[in-house]
Amino acid sequence: MKLIVNGVEYPITSPPLTPLLHVLREELEITGPKAGCQQGGCGTCSVLVDGEPRRSCLTAVAAVDGAEITTIEGLGQAEDLSAVQHAFNEHYAAQCGFCTPGMVIAATALIERKGGPVEREDVIEALGGHYCRCTGYVKIIDAVIAASHAGSLA
Amino acid sequence: MTADVLVPTSAAEAAALFGSGEAITVFAGGTILLPEIAAGRLSLDRTLMLHRSGLDQLTDHGDRVVIGAMVPVAALVDSDEPVLAAYAKHVADGEVRRTATVGGNICAPPGREAQRGDLGAPLIALGARVRSTGAGGERVEPIEDFLASDRSGRLVLEIEYDRFPRRSGTSGRRRRHAHSYAIGAVAACSREDGSDLRVGVSGVGPTAVRARSVEQSRDPAAVLADVTPLDDAVATAKYRSTVLPILVREALDRLENA
Protein backbone atom coordinates (compact mmCIF):
# COMPACT_ATOMS: atom_id res chain seq x y z
CA MET A 1 0.00 0.00 0.00
CA LYS A 2 0.97 3.64 -0.36
CA LEU A 3 -0.37 7.04 0.64
CA ILE A 4 0.41 10.51 -0.63
CA VAL A 5 0.36 12.64 2.50
CA ASN A 6 0.70 16.41 2.10
CA GLY A 7 2.25 15.83 -1.31
CA VAL A 8 4.81 13.23 -0.24
CA GLU A 9 4.41 9.59 -1.23
CA TYR A 10 4.96 7.00 1.51
CA PRO A 11 4.95 3.19 1.30
CA ILE A 12 2.70 1.82 4.04
CA THR A 13 3.44 -1.32 6.02
CA SER A 14 0.67 -1.21 8.66
CA PRO A 15 -1.92 -4.02 8.43
CA PRO A 16 -4.84 -3.23 6.08
CA LEU A 17 -7.43 -2.83 8.84
CA THR A 18 -5.38 -0.21 10.70
CA PRO A 19 -7.24 3.10 11.04
CA LEU A 20 -5.74 5.80 8.80
CA LEU A 21 -5.34 7.86 11.99
CA HIS A 22 -2.92 5.35 13.49
CA VAL A 23 -0.99 5.02 10.23
CA LEU A 24 -0.51 8.78 10.11
CA ARG A 25 0.42 9.18 13.77
CA GLU A 26 2.38 6.01 14.48
CA GLU A 27 3.84 4.80 11.18
CA LEU A 28 4.42 8.20 9.54
CA GLU A 29 4.73 10.28 12.75
CA ILE A 30 2.38 12.94 11.36
CA THR A 31 0.64 13.93 14.56
CA GLY A 32 -1.54 16.87 13.49
CA PRO A 33 -4.66 14.66 13.39
CA LYS A 34 -5.41 13.97 17.05
CA ALA A 35 -6.56 10.69 18.57
CA GLY A 36 -9.64 11.85 20.44
CA CYS A 37 -12.65 9.58 20.90
CA GLN A 38 -11.42 7.18 18.18
CA GLN A 39 -14.96 6.17 17.34
CA GLY A 40 -15.99 8.92 14.94
CA GLY A 41 -17.72 11.14 17.47
CA CYS A 42 -15.39 14.09 18.05
CA GLY A 43 -13.87 15.09 14.70
CA THR A 44 -10.35 16.05 15.78
CA CYS A 45 -8.84 13.28 13.60
CA SER A 46 -10.47 14.55 10.38
CA VAL A 47 -8.26 14.78 7.29
CA LEU A 48 -8.91 15.42 3.61
CA VAL A 49 -9.01 12.22 1.54
CA ASP A 50 -8.76 13.18 -2.13
CA GLY A 51 -10.03 16.61 -1.09
CA GLU A 52 -13.01 15.49 1.01
CA PRO A 53 -13.08 15.59 4.81
CA ARG A 54 -13.33 12.18 6.49
CA ARG A 55 -12.71 10.80 9.96
CA SER A 56 -9.30 9.14 9.83
CA CYS A 57 -10.23 7.00 12.86
CA LEU A 58 -13.15 5.43 10.92
CA THR A 59 -11.19 4.88 7.71
CA ALA A 60 -9.28 1.62 7.23
CA VAL A 61 -5.98 2.37 5.52
CA ALA A 62 -6.58 -0.32 2.87
CA ALA A 63 -9.77 1.46 1.80
CA VAL A 64 -7.78 4.59 0.88
CA ASP A 65 -4.71 2.88 -0.58
CA GLY A 66 -3.13 5.31 -3.08
CA ALA A 67 -5.22 8.30 -1.99
CA GLU A 68 -4.00 11.83 -1.44
CA ILE A 69 -4.29 12.76 2.22
CA THR A 70 -4.07 16.30 3.53
CA THR A 71 -3.57 16.87 7.24
CA ILE A 72 -3.39 20.17 9.11
CA GLU A 73 0.38 20.12 8.44
CA GLY A 74 -0.37 20.33 4.71
CA LEU A 75 -2.44 23.50 4.91
CA GLY A 76 0.08 26.07 6.08
CA GLN A 77 3.27 26.69 8.03
CA ALA A 78 3.87 28.64 11.23
CA GLU A 79 5.18 31.61 9.24
CA ASP A 80 2.72 31.18 6.37
CA LEU A 81 -0.69 30.29 7.75
CA SER A 82 -3.61 29.31 5.52
CA ALA A 83 -6.59 31.66 5.48
CA VAL A 84 -8.50 29.43 7.91
CA GLN A 85 -5.54 29.05 10.26
CA HIS A 86 -4.96 32.83 10.14
CA ALA A 87 -8.65 33.49 10.94
CA PHE A 88 -8.56 31.00 13.85
CA ASN A 89 -5.57 32.90 15.22
CA GLU A 90 -7.16 36.33 14.70
CA HIS A 91 -10.48 35.31 16.29
CA TYR A 92 -9.04 33.39 19.26
CA ALA A 93 -10.79 30.30 17.91
CA ALA A 94 -8.30 27.92 19.54
CA GLN A 95 -8.34 27.52 23.30
CA CYS A 96 -6.71 24.23 24.36
CA GLY A 97 -6.31 23.49 20.63
CA PHE A 98 -7.09 19.79 20.71
CA CYS A 99 -10.12 20.06 18.40
CA THR A 100 -8.48 22.66 16.15
CA PRO A 101 -6.90 20.32 13.53
CA GLY A 102 -10.28 18.77 12.70
CA MET A 103 -12.13 22.08 12.84
CA VAL A 104 -9.63 23.70 10.43
CA ILE A 105 -9.74 20.73 8.02
CA ALA A 106 -13.56 20.70 7.96
CA ALA A 107 -13.73 24.49 7.58
CA THR A 108 -11.21 24.45 4.73
CA ALA A 109 -13.24 21.79 2.90
CA LEU A 110 -16.47 23.73 3.43
CA ILE A 111 -15.05 26.98 2.04
CA GLU A 112 -13.53 25.18 -0.96
CA ARG A 113 -16.83 23.46 -1.68
CA LYS A 114 -18.81 26.70 -1.43
CA GLY A 115 -16.19 28.64 -3.39
CA GLY A 116 -16.82 31.86 -1.46
CA PRO A 117 -18.44 33.37 1.62
CA VAL A 118 -20.33 30.89 3.81
CA GLU A 119 -23.34 31.43 6.05
CA ARG A 120 -23.46 30.62 9.75
CA GLU A 121 -25.87 27.71 9.03
CA ASP A 122 -23.38 26.23 6.54
CA VAL A 123 -20.68 26.25 9.22
CA ILE A 124 -22.95 24.67 11.83
CA GLU A 125 -23.90 21.93 9.36
CA ALA A 126 -20.31 21.25 8.26
CA LEU A 127 -18.78 21.40 11.76
CA GLY A 128 -21.80 19.95 13.58
CA GLY A 129 -20.06 16.64 14.23
CA HIS A 130 -16.92 18.28 15.67
CA TYR A 131 -16.67 18.77 19.41
CA CYS A 132 -14.84 21.56 21.23
CA ARG A 133 -14.79 20.67 24.94
CA CYS A 134 -13.64 24.20 25.75
CA THR A 135 -17.01 25.07 24.14
CA GLY A 136 -15.48 27.84 22.06
CA TYR A 137 -17.96 27.38 19.27
CA VAL A 138 -18.93 31.03 18.77
CA LYS A 139 -15.36 32.11 18.04
CA ILE A 140 -14.78 29.06 15.85
CA ILE A 141 -17.84 29.82 13.73
CA ASP A 142 -16.85 33.51 13.52
CA ALA A 143 -13.36 32.49 12.36
CA VAL A 144 -14.69 30.21 9.61
CA ILE A 145 -17.03 32.92 8.30
CA ALA A 146 -14.18 35.45 8.34
CA ALA A 147 -11.88 33.03 6.52
CA SER A 148 -14.52 32.49 3.85
CA HIS A 149 -14.42 36.23 3.11
CA ALA A 150 -10.63 36.27 2.79
CA GLY A 151 -10.69 35.45 -0.92
CA SER A 152 -8.01 32.81 -1.19
CA LEU A 153 -7.50 29.78 1.03
CA ALA A 154 -3.76 29.66 0.36
CA MET B 1 -4.11 -7.70 13.99
CA THR B 2 -3.28 -10.57 11.69
CA ALA B 3 -6.61 -10.77 9.92
CA ASP B 4 -6.78 -12.54 6.57
CA VAL B 5 -8.11 -9.63 4.51
CA LEU B 6 -9.79 -10.41 1.19
CA VAL B 7 -10.30 -7.59 -1.33
CA PRO B 8 -12.49 -8.76 -4.24
CA THR B 9 -12.49 -6.66 -7.41
CA SER B 10 -15.99 -7.60 -8.61
CA ALA B 11 -19.39 -8.42 -7.13
CA ALA B 12 -19.10 -11.99 -8.44
CA GLU B 13 -15.72 -12.44 -6.74
CA ALA B 14 -17.15 -10.97 -3.52
CA ALA B 15 -20.06 -13.44 -3.65
CA ALA B 16 -17.70 -16.37 -4.29
CA LEU B 17 -15.40 -15.42 -1.40
CA PHE B 18 -18.39 -14.87 0.91
CA GLY B 19 -19.74 -18.34 0.08
CA SER B 20 -22.33 -19.30 2.67
CA GLY B 21 -21.10 -16.62 5.06
CA GLU B 22 -19.42 -19.03 7.48
CA ALA B 23 -16.47 -17.66 9.44
CA ILE B 24 -16.18 -14.45 7.46
CA THR B 25 -16.84 -10.83 8.41
CA VAL B 26 -17.96 -8.29 5.83
CA PHE B 27 -16.23 -4.92 6.10
CA ALA B 28 -18.19 -2.28 4.18
CA GLY B 29 -17.51 1.31 5.29
CA GLY B 30 -16.16 0.14 8.63
CA THR B 31 -17.62 2.92 10.76
CA ILE B 32 -18.92 0.35 13.24
CA LEU B 33 -16.23 -2.32 12.94
CA LEU B 34 -13.05 -0.26 12.80
CA PRO B 35 -13.29 1.36 16.27
CA GLU B 36 -14.01 -2.09 17.73
CA ILE B 37 -10.96 -3.57 16.00
CA ALA B 38 -8.70 -0.63 16.92
CA ALA B 39 -9.74 -0.81 20.58
CA GLY B 40 -9.02 -4.53 20.69
CA ARG B 41 -12.64 -5.45 21.41
CA LEU B 42 -12.98 -7.35 18.15
CA SER B 43 -10.54 -9.70 16.52
CA LEU B 44 -11.26 -10.83 12.98
CA ASP B 45 -9.90 -13.85 11.15
CA ARG B 46 -11.26 -13.68 7.60
CA THR B 47 -12.45 -10.26 6.53
CA LEU B 48 -14.11 -9.38 3.23
CA MET B 49 -13.42 -5.75 2.31
CA LEU B 50 -15.81 -4.50 -0.37
CA HIS B 51 -14.31 -1.15 -1.36
CA ARG B 52 -13.00 -2.47 -4.70
CA SER B 53 -15.98 -4.75 -5.43
CA GLY B 54 -17.80 -2.34 -7.74
CA LEU B 55 -20.88 -2.41 -5.50
CA ASP B 56 -20.71 1.36 -5.07
CA GLN B 57 -22.94 2.29 -8.02
CA LEU B 58 -26.15 4.29 -7.57
CA THR B 59 -28.10 3.70 -10.80
CA ASP B 60 -31.22 5.51 -11.90
CA HIS B 61 -33.15 3.39 -14.41
CA GLY B 62 -36.01 5.91 -14.59
CA ASP B 63 -38.77 3.75 -13.16
CA ARG B 64 -36.39 1.95 -10.78
CA VAL B 65 -33.45 3.07 -8.63
CA VAL B 66 -30.70 0.61 -7.70
CA ILE B 67 -28.43 1.37 -4.74
CA GLY B 68 -25.28 -0.74 -4.53
CA ALA B 69 -24.45 -1.99 -1.04
CA MET B 70 -21.28 0.15 -0.96
CA VAL B 71 -22.94 3.42 -1.93
CA PRO B 72 -22.04 5.88 0.83
CA VAL B 73 -24.93 7.22 2.91
CA ALA B 74 -23.77 10.70 1.79
CA ALA B 75 -24.95 9.89 -1.76
CA LEU B 76 -28.57 9.64 -0.56
CA VAL B 77 -28.69 13.10 1.00
CA ASP B 78 -29.53 14.56 -2.42
CA SER B 79 -32.03 11.81 -3.29
CA ASP B 80 -35.18 12.98 -5.10
CA GLU B 81 -37.20 10.77 -2.73
CA PRO B 82 -37.82 13.09 0.25
CA VAL B 83 -38.07 10.23 2.76
CA LEU B 84 -34.66 8.88 1.80
CA ALA B 85 -33.01 12.31 1.78
CA ALA B 86 -34.55 13.25 5.14
CA TYR B 87 -33.26 10.14 6.86
CA ALA B 88 -29.84 10.15 5.16
CA LYS B 89 -29.06 13.68 6.28
CA HIS B 90 -29.76 12.69 9.87
CA VAL B 91 -27.19 9.88 9.88
CA ALA B 92 -24.20 11.19 11.90
CA ASP B 93 -22.48 14.07 10.05
CA GLY B 94 -21.23 14.59 6.50
CA GLU B 95 -17.75 13.19 7.19
CA VAL B 96 -19.06 9.96 8.69
CA ARG B 97 -21.66 9.65 5.91
CA ARG B 98 -18.86 9.65 3.31
CA THR B 99 -17.48 6.47 4.87
CA ALA B 100 -20.67 4.77 6.10
CA THR B 101 -22.49 2.67 3.47
CA VAL B 102 -26.13 1.88 2.76
CA GLY B 103 -25.46 -1.87 2.90
CA GLY B 104 -23.73 -1.50 6.25
CA ASN B 105 -26.61 0.57 7.56
CA ILE B 106 -29.21 -2.13 6.88
CA CYS B 107 -26.93 -4.89 8.23
CA ALA B 108 -25.89 -3.06 11.42
CA PRO B 109 -26.61 -4.91 14.65
CA PRO B 110 -28.03 -2.85 17.53
CA GLY B 111 -25.41 -0.80 19.36
CA ARG B 112 -24.67 -1.05 23.06
CA GLU B 113 -26.28 2.29 23.80
CA ALA B 114 -28.78 2.84 21.01
CA GLN B 115 -30.57 1.23 18.09
CA ARG B 116 -29.05 1.51 14.62
CA GLY B 117 -30.06 1.14 11.00
CA ASP B 118 -31.88 4.43 10.39
CA LEU B 119 -32.35 3.85 6.65
CA GLY B 120 -34.60 0.83 7.24
CA ALA B 121 -37.72 2.96 7.77
CA PRO B 122 -37.60 5.01 4.54
CA LEU B 123 -36.61 1.94 2.51
CA ILE B 124 -39.63 0.07 3.94
CA ALA B 125 -41.85 3.04 3.08
CA LEU B 126 -40.50 3.01 -0.50
CA GLY B 127 -41.22 -0.72 -0.84
CA ALA B 128 -37.50 -1.45 -1.39
CA ARG B 129 -36.17 -4.92 -2.16
CA VAL B 130 -32.80 -6.34 -1.09
CA ARG B 131 -30.70 -8.55 -3.37
CA SER B 132 -28.32 -10.63 -1.31
CA THR B 133 -26.25 -13.77 -1.59
CA GLY B 134 -25.19 -16.48 0.85
CA ALA B 135 -26.23 -20.05 1.65
CA GLY B 136 -28.69 -21.17 -1.06
CA GLY B 137 -27.44 -18.52 -3.49
CA GLU B 138 -28.86 -15.19 -4.50
CA ARG B 139 -32.30 -14.02 -3.45
CA VAL B 140 -34.40 -10.87 -3.68
CA GLU B 141 -36.83 -10.07 -0.86
CA PRO B 142 -38.72 -7.12 0.61
CA ILE B 143 -36.47 -5.14 2.93
CA GLU B 144 -38.76 -5.78 5.93
CA ASP B 145 -38.26 -9.53 5.42
CA PHE B 146 -34.51 -9.08 5.06
CA LEU B 147 -34.36 -7.02 8.27
CA ALA B 148 -36.37 -9.64 10.16
CA SER B 149 -34.09 -12.50 8.99
CA ASP B 150 -30.69 -13.63 10.25
CA ARG B 151 -28.72 -11.06 8.28
CA SER B 152 -25.35 -12.36 9.42
CA GLY B 153 -25.39 -15.11 6.78
CA ARG B 154 -26.14 -12.75 3.89
CA LEU B 155 -23.97 -10.51 1.74
CA VAL B 156 -26.06 -7.56 0.52
CA LEU B 157 -25.37 -6.77 -3.14
CA GLU B 158 -27.90 -4.05 -3.82
CA ILE B 159 -31.16 -2.43 -2.76
CA GLU B 160 -33.76 -1.29 -5.28
CA TYR B 161 -37.06 0.54 -5.25
CA ASP B 162 -39.59 1.51 -7.90
CA ARG B 163 -40.02 5.14 -8.76
CA PHE B 164 -43.50 6.55 -9.22
CA PRO B 165 -45.21 9.73 -8.02
CA ARG B 166 -45.58 9.47 -4.25
CA ARG B 167 -46.77 11.38 -1.25
CA SER B 168 -44.54 11.02 1.76
CA GLY B 169 -44.14 12.16 5.35
CA THR B 170 -41.54 11.67 8.05
CA SER B 171 -41.29 12.37 11.75
CA GLY B 172 -38.68 11.84 14.45
CA ARG B 173 -37.77 13.10 17.91
CA ARG B 174 -34.93 14.25 20.10
CA ARG B 175 -31.92 14.02 17.85
CA ARG B 176 -30.04 16.76 19.66
CA HIS B 177 -26.73 16.76 17.83
CA ALA B 178 -24.89 15.04 14.98
CA HIS B 179 -23.97 11.96 16.97
CA SER B 180 -27.12 11.29 18.94
CA TYR B 181 -29.84 8.92 17.84
CA ALA B 182 -33.53 9.73 17.59
CA ILE B 183 -35.74 7.94 20.10
CA GLY B 184 -37.70 6.76 17.10
CA ALA B 185 -38.51 7.82 13.57
CA VAL B 186 -41.33 7.11 11.16
CA ALA B 187 -41.42 7.21 7.35
CA ALA B 188 -44.63 6.91 5.36
CA CYS B 189 -45.24 6.80 1.61
CA SER B 190 -48.31 6.27 -0.55
CA ARG B 191 -49.35 6.72 -4.14
CA GLU B 192 -50.60 10.19 -5.00
CA ASP B 193 -54.23 9.12 -4.52
CA GLY B 194 -53.38 7.92 -1.00
CA SER B 195 -53.52 4.22 -1.83
CA ASP B 196 -50.75 1.69 -1.20
CA LEU B 197 -49.72 3.25 2.13
CA ARG B 198 -46.46 1.87 3.52
CA VAL B 199 -45.13 2.82 6.95
CA GLY B 200 -41.65 2.10 8.33
CA VAL B 201 -40.50 2.66 11.91
CA SER B 202 -36.84 2.78 12.94
CA GLY B 203 -34.89 3.46 16.09
CA VAL B 204 -37.24 1.84 18.57
CA GLY B 205 -36.02 -1.77 18.36
CA PRO B 206 -33.15 -3.87 17.01
CA THR B 207 -34.19 -3.33 13.38
CA ALA B 208 -36.63 -1.15 11.48
CA VAL B 209 -40.13 -2.62 11.25
CA ARG B 210 -43.01 -2.30 8.79
CA ALA B 211 -46.16 -1.08 10.57
CA ARG B 212 -48.78 -3.10 8.68
CA SER B 213 -51.47 -2.47 11.31
CA VAL B 214 -51.18 1.27 10.68
CA GLU B 215 -51.25 0.73 6.93
CA GLN B 216 -54.50 -1.22 7.21
CA SER B 217 -56.30 0.83 9.87
CA ARG B 218 -54.67 4.26 9.37
CA ASP B 219 -54.84 4.45 13.17
CA PRO B 220 -51.56 5.81 14.65
CA ALA B 221 -52.12 3.92 17.92
CA ALA B 222 -52.09 0.64 15.98
CA VAL B 223 -48.31 0.99 15.61
CA LEU B 224 -47.88 -0.66 19.00
CA ALA B 225 -49.33 -3.86 17.54
CA ASP B 226 -46.39 -3.99 15.08
CA VAL B 227 -43.53 -2.61 17.14
CA THR B 228 -42.22 -3.55 20.57
CA PRO B 229 -40.17 -0.57 21.79
CA LEU B 230 -37.00 -1.31 23.74
CA ASP B 231 -35.15 0.35 26.60
CA ASP B 232 -31.74 1.78 25.79
CA ALA B 233 -29.57 4.76 26.71
CA VAL B 234 -31.59 7.06 24.46
CA ALA B 235 -35.09 6.40 25.83
CA THR B 236 -37.14 3.97 27.87
CA ALA B 237 -39.57 1.55 26.25
CA LYS B 238 -42.38 3.25 28.17
CA TYR B 239 -41.51 6.67 26.81
CA ARG B 240 -41.14 5.32 23.29
CA SER B 241 -44.53 3.62 23.55
CA THR B 242 -46.08 6.97 24.46
CA VAL B 243 -44.34 8.99 21.75
CA LEU B 244 -44.40 6.52 18.86
CA PRO B 245 -48.13 6.89 18.02
CA ILE B 246 -47.61 10.67 17.99
CA LEU B 247 -44.74 10.29 15.51
CA VAL B 248 -46.91 8.07 13.33
CA ARG B 249 -49.73 10.61 13.40
CA GLU B 250 -47.33 13.41 12.43
CA ALA B 251 -45.88 11.39 9.54
CA LEU B 252 -49.37 10.50 8.28
CA ASP B 253 -50.52 14.14 8.60
CA ARG B 254 -47.48 15.31 6.65
CA LEU B 255 -48.14 12.69 3.98
CA GLU B 256 -51.77 13.80 3.79
CA ASN B 257 -50.76 17.44 3.38
CA ALA B 258 -47.81 16.79 1.06
Image (cartoon, helix red, strand yellow):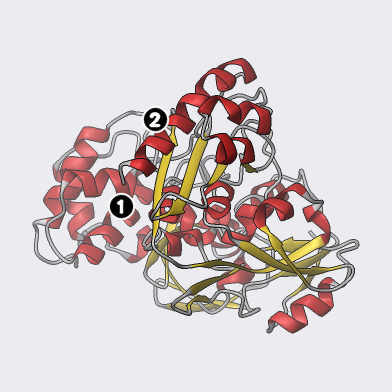
The answer to whether residue B209 shows anywhere in this view is: yes
Q: Which residue is drawn at 51% across and 73% down?
A: B64
Chain letter of the residue beneath label 1 in the structure image: A
Question: Would you identify the image quadrant in which residue A68 lies?
Answer: bottom left
Tell me: B111 left or right of A113: right
Q: Amino acid type of disc 2?
A: Arg
The answer to whether residue A31 shows anywhere in this view is: no
- Residue B216 % position (x, y): 59, 39
Question: Badge 2: how crowded within 10 Å, few (<14), some, or many (20+)?
Answer: few
Question: Would you identify the image quadrant in which residue A78 lies?
Answer: bottom left
Which residue matches tag 1? A104
Observer-nearest of B59 and A124: B59
What's the distance in space between the residues labelled 2 and 1, CA to CA?
A: 16 Å
Asked if disc 2 and disc 1 are in contact, CB closer than 8 Å, the reply is: no
For label 1, the SS is: helix
Observer-nearest of B118 and B98: B118
Q: Which residue is drawn at 32% across and 29% down?
A: A135
Question: Which comes sooner in the sequence, label 2 or label 1?
Answer: 1
- Residue B203 % position (x, y): 58, 36
Q: Is A128 situated above or below B156?
A: above
The image shows a total of numbered marks equal to 2
- Residue B91 % position (x, y): 48, 47
Chain letter of the residue beneath label 2 in the structure image: A
Observer-nearest of A128 and A28: A128
Q: Which residue is drawn at 52% across and 68% down?
A: B162
Q: Residue at x 90, y 61 (%)?
A: B23
For label 2, the SS is: loop
Which residue matches tag 2? A133
Q: Amino acid type of disc 1?
A: Val
